[in-house]
Amino acid sequence: MTHTMGNVSRRSFLKTGAVLGGGVVASGLPLSQVIWAAEGKVLRACCPGDISILDPAFYARQVEVDVMSCIYSKLIRYKPGSEWGWELEAAEKMEPVDPTHIRFRLQKGIKFTGGHGEMTAKDVKFSFERIFKHKSFLAPEWGPLDRVELEDDYTGVLVFRAPFAPAWLLSLTDATGHILSEDAVMKATNDGGNFGVKLTAFSGPYVLADWKPNQYILLTRNPEWSGPKPGFDEIRILPVNDPKARERAYQAGDVDFAPISLDSLKTLKSNPPANTMVENNPSLGYTWIGMNTDHPKLKDINVRKAIQWAINVPQILDAAYSGQVNVATGTVAPGVVGYRAKALVPPEGDLAKAKECVNAFIKSDSFSKPVEL
């Protein structure tokens, strides 16, 4: 028997969305992918935290990225699934001209709501260049982008000062790649800066229909959307910070989609609720231990190497993340250009090597008194 909650058939949801996600999602699966993975009248989702900004140049939280990906458009977007890749969205064509130039051609007829007209290459130029003009802290996501040159109403070229491989799987596909209506932003801000949540010009498959802070976010179909039809008539997002509370809400049937805590992942994977798929997808995020090389006790490279060799990463992951996350080999995620399959130092470390580094420090000119590690 199909288990149905809130007009959404979970079994149908999970069958059609088996690659993308399920009723419960552990990590790494944006809500904006789920809307293409299933069908129903209403999707009820839990997300960690509430929105406070829907400006792609100044956002702060993942839930804001999820909402923006439903209400705005990008030239290209991430492919659904767990493999890193991209596909066309607002762009009709994307081509690398050379290592520092990317040409785009927009689809014709993409409309902004609120009477703000058709999306043009001028809106693309405005959206990307304002990130630098207004000194956004997110500017590093665009690396050495210099400017956007316009060729006609629908065609332009992104000009970088140097080659930038992350352009395809970060700059263009993530939150700062969203395209805004220049007309709407200027009317909302006068100077083109941070508009918070004031913008009313949407170009994605959904529009922000209602928002009650700390209660819910309501997205409904965009009547002016001309792209592929998304799976749901409306999406109701409940801001719930506590992962355990999200799990209880899901198990009680109050929501259809919820991120869960890592310490619950193993249990839910081995014994999931009825008609539920538990997904654990990769992320671009990473957690690391850094060292202040200006600190007097860390200036000598042998001390830093000793610490590096003494760290046992799997033990840390077992204690801090219930052993449910993978060991990183660097700051670049698998599947992204620049990824290395093997770390320079084994994840388990090597205490003998650490002691060798300590001894090298003791014999060096830097040594003046014992350093406890």
Image (tube, helix red, strand yellow):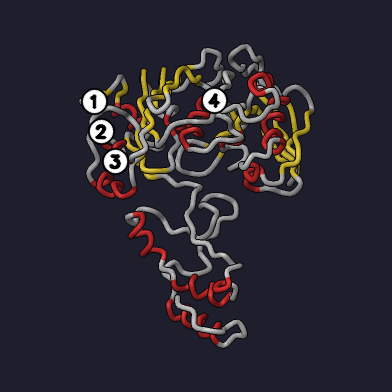
Judge the density around disc 4: few (<14), some (14-19), many (≥20) Cα neighbours within 10 Å: some
Above or below — where is 122 with respect to 223?
A: below
Q: Are marks 2 and 1 in contact (CB under 8 Å)?
A: yes
Q: Which residue is mark 1?
A: 2
Residue pointed to by mark 4: 197
Residues at discs 1 and 3 in contact (Cβ within 8 Å): no
Q: Amino acid at mark 4?
A: Val
Q: Earlier in the sequence, mark 1 or mark 3?
A: 1
Q: Are marks 3 and 4 in contact (CB under 8 Å)?
A: no
Q: Is residue 284 left or right of residue 215?
A: right
**Residue at which label 2 appears:** 275
Residue found at x 45% / y 78%: 372
Between 217 and 204, which is closer to the camera in this rendering?
217
Q: Residue furthest left?
A: 1
Dot 1 or dot 4: first in sequence order is 1
Q: How far apart, in angstroms, are the residues tagged by discs 3 and 4?
A: 29 Å
* Amino acid type, mark 1: Thr
Q: Which mark is residue 232?
A: none
Q: CA distance from mark 2 to mark 3?
A: 20 Å
Mark 3 or mark 4, whichever is nearer to me: 4
Percent across and percent down for residue 296 are 58, 72
- Residue at 52% over, 38% down: 60
- Do we see residue 38 in this rendering? no
* Label 2 or label 3, whichever comes before in sequence order: 3
Crowding at mark 1 (Cα within 10 Å: few <14, some 14-19, many 20+): few
Mark 2 or mark 1, earlier in chain: 1
Q: Which residue is mark 3?
A: 244
